Image: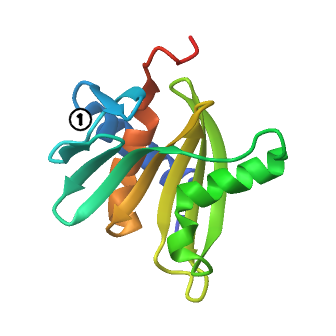
């Protein structure tokens, strides 16, 4: 009679956690970066090139690219509801002015890290449910800080994106301590 092994639970979750811990451990010390007026520290995975463009910080590995951007979000706070404000932030983070109607949100989650409340989104093509992309944004009280997968496959960029997002810590004088 064949022996049946008990089913293991959480194998993929544990594997993903191990991968993240390895990625964070191999990233080296955090780097101080200024994205416009916002100052943060984050870990950059080994081999990734950092290009400083002021409000936009680019991280590249070959043709793959992740960006960290500070963006002003103009709206009239006296005549805007919280729902309207969230919609404006979401549109700014996703740059929907360029991609209107092509993408939809597949997953949305919020988490608190490094002194910021992050909203993380996974989007995909509305028609094919392919072309996955992850973007995370945090409202700092005056501006939006956005971490975005600009170029490359979401599966390949995922570990680097997660390592950067998990390590971001706000350090500018406006940061709440």
**Which residue: 44% across, 40% down?**
165
Is residue 4 positioned above or below 87 on the image?
Answer: below
Please state if 34 lies on the left or on the right of 143 as rendered: left
- Percent coordinates x, y for residue 98 in the rendering: 50, 73
Relative to the observer, which residue lies in front, 138 or 42?
Answer: 138
The residue furthest bottom is: 127
| Location of residue 96 by image quarter | bottom right
In this image, 41 relative to 108: left or right? left
Query: Dot 1, crowdedness within 10 Å: few (<14), some or many (≥20)?
Result: some
Q: Secondary structure at mark 1?
A: loop
Report the front residue among 37 and 27. Answer: 37
Q: Residue at x 61, y 82 (%)?
A: 126
Residue at image mark 1: 26
- Above or below for 117 versus 3: above
**Residue 9 is at least partly visible in this image:** no
In the rendering, at what x and y percent does residue 71 appear? 49, 45
> Does residue 73 sit above or below 12 in this rendering?
above
Residue 148, how many percent across, how many down?
A: 43, 54
Confirm whether residue 34 shows in the render. yes
Q: Nearer the viewer, residue 139 or 108?
A: 139
The residue nearer to you, when weighing 32 against 111, is 32
Residue 46 locus on image (x, y percent): 18, 42
């Amino acid at each position: 009679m064949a022996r049946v092994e008990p089913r293991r639970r959480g194998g993929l979750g544990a594997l993903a956690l191990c991968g993240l811990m390895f990625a964070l451990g191999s990233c080296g010390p955090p780097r101080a970066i200024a994205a416009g007026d916002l100052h943060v520290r984050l870990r950059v995975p080994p081999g990734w090139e950092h290009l400083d463009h002021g409000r936009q910080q680019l991280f590249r590995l070959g043709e793959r690219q992740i960006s960290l951007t500070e963006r002003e979000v103009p709206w009239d706070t006296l005549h805007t509801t919280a729902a309207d404000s969230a919609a404006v932030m979401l549109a700014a983070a996703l740059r929907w002015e360029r991609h209107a109607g092509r993408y939809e949100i597949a997953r949305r989650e919020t988490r608190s890290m490094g002194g910021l409340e992050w909203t993380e989104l996974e989007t995909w093509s509305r028609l094919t449910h392919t072309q996955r992309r992850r973007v995370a944004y945090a409202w700092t009280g005056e501006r939006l800080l956005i971490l975005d997968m600009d170029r490359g496959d979401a599966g390949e960029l995922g570990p680097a994106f997660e390592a950067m997002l998990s390590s971001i810590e706000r350090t500018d004088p406006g940061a709440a301590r």
